[in-house]
């Protein structure tokens, strides 16, 4: 029987325990959308996690959707992230970077030359984002042409290479929470014809091509992926048949030999088993995936212990508890009380609510 506190090897990455810091958007990048010294300290403080998944980072200037999120496309960003990975490694931790393209969840004021966001579709969702001017409705997107897909895949490939150059142990591809890859997957959004629209196989094609390209570039054993089959974040309705769609996706990912698959169960940031929600069989997907299985969304200590002990997952990712508890691993081990999270300090701002949460030792 495995314990949450036992070491595990996922692909090529050896972890000290099965407690993962989930990717968390904090909007504290400094000039040039690079991580600054506070971000180095923030991740260093949390290095006792078995694995840190560093916050979603845009793979190109067109991939950004919110103010002051970090990127992984410029030499300055690579240098900034190198400070982070060095600090985490010196503290004995492991860290991968989440690679992000927001697709239609963006605003022209954040994009080069005021461009329209790009997506699988030209339909605008009733969603909001955060810009220099504050909260704003997202801009109307432009549907990508099929002949633009190869350069999009190149952006993912280059971002993965940059992440390795920055010292990350690997990458996680963000294919969850209504962002670009999710916008291709779901028939509630993807209204294309041609090779990237229509059938499940066509809608999954972009994700699978991205995963193959990154696995070829940096090795499948350093590559993971995050999915959220039942989330309706940002006015993005469920697929008409999530079980069939995500079963196909997992079956196609299985032979790649990825390090892990990370699934958000239920509604992102909300209920893991929403009342009156359509049922979804996550365990059926798990059975089809040979790599490490990581689950997320509101797990209590008891649920996390039980889920790993029962073999229902190999790793548990914690989001909000890691924001307010840099020493979450120790607190879970000792069954110690957790600090409260300051919700008004989540997105943007300074050190407060970012690097000033006390440890038990404090
Ligand atoms: C909250 C605010 C902005 C972005 C996600 C990257 O949900 C995000 C995100 C979350 O995956």
Image: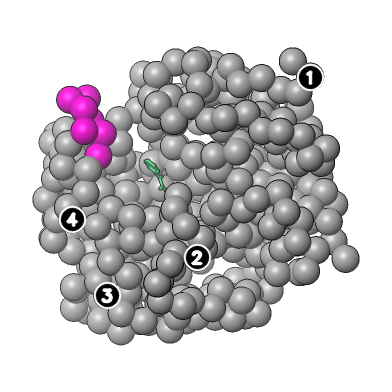
| Magenta run includes residue 134 | yes
The answer to the question of whether label 1 and label 4 lie on touching residues, with beta carbons closer than 8 A, is no
Count residues near mark 1 (Cα–Cα under 10 Å), then give few for <14, some for 14-19, many for 20+. few
- Distance between mark 2 and mark 1 Cα atoms: 35 Å
Which is nearer the eye, 344 or 165? 344
Position of the C terminus by quadrant: top right
The image quadrant where one finds ligand 1 is: top left
Question: Residue 361 — which label?
Answer: 1
Left or right of residue 75, residue 48 in this image: right
- Dominant SS type (magenta): strand
x then y, percent, for residue 273: 50, 65
**Which mark is first along the chain, 2 or 3?**
3
The answer to the question of whether label 1 and label 3 lie on touching residues, with beta carbons closer than 8 A, is no
- Is residue 166 visible in the rendered image? The answer is no
Identify the residue position indicated by label 2 in the image. Answer: 273
* SS under mark 2: loop
- Is residue 333 visible in the rendered image? The answer is yes
């Amino acid at each position: 029987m495995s314990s949450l506190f036992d070491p595990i090897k996922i692909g090529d990455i050896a972890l000290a325990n099965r407690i993962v810091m989930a990717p968390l958007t904090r909007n504290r990048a400094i000039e040039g959308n690079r991580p600054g010294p506070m971000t180095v300290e923030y991740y260093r403080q949390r290095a006792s996690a078995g694995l840190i998944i560093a916050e979603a980072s845009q793979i190109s200037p067109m991939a950004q959707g919110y103010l002051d999120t970090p990127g992984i496309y410029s030499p300055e960003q690579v240098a900034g992230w190198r400070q982070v990975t060095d600090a985490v490694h010196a503290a004995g931790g492991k860290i991968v970077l989440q690679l992000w393209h927001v697709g239609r969840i963006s605003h022209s004021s954040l994009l080069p030359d005021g461009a329209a966001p790009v997506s699988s579709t030209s339909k605008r969702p009733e969603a909001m984002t955060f810009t220099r001017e504050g909260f704003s409705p997202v801009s109307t997107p432009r549907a990508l042409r099929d002949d633009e897909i190869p350069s999009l895949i190149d952006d993912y490939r280059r971002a993965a290479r940059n992440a390795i150059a920055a010292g990350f142990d690997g990458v996680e591809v963000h294919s969850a929470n209504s962002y670009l890859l999710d916008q291709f997957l779901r028939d509630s959004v993807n209204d294309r014809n041609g090779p990237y629209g229509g059938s499940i196989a066509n809608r999954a094609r972009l994700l699978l091509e991205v995963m193959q390209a990154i696995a070829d570039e940096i090795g499948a054993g350093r590559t993971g992926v995050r999915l959220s089959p039942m989330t309706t974040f940002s006015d993005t309705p469920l697929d008409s048949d999530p079980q069939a769609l995500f079963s196909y996706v997992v079956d196609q990912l299985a032979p790649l030999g990825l390090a892990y698959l990370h699934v958000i169960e239920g509604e992102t940031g909300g209920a893991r088993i929403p009342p009156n929600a359509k049922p979804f069989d996550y365990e059926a997907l798990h059975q089809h995936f040979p790599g490490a299985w990581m689950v997320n969304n509101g797990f209590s200590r008891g649920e996390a212990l039980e889920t790993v002990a029962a073999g229902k997952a190999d790793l548990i990712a914690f989001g909000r508890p890691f924001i307010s508890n840099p020493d979450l691993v120790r607190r879970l081990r000792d069954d110690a009380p957790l600090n409260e999270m300051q919700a008004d300090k989540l997105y943007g701002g300074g050190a407060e609510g970012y690097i000033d949460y006390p440890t038990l030792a404090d």
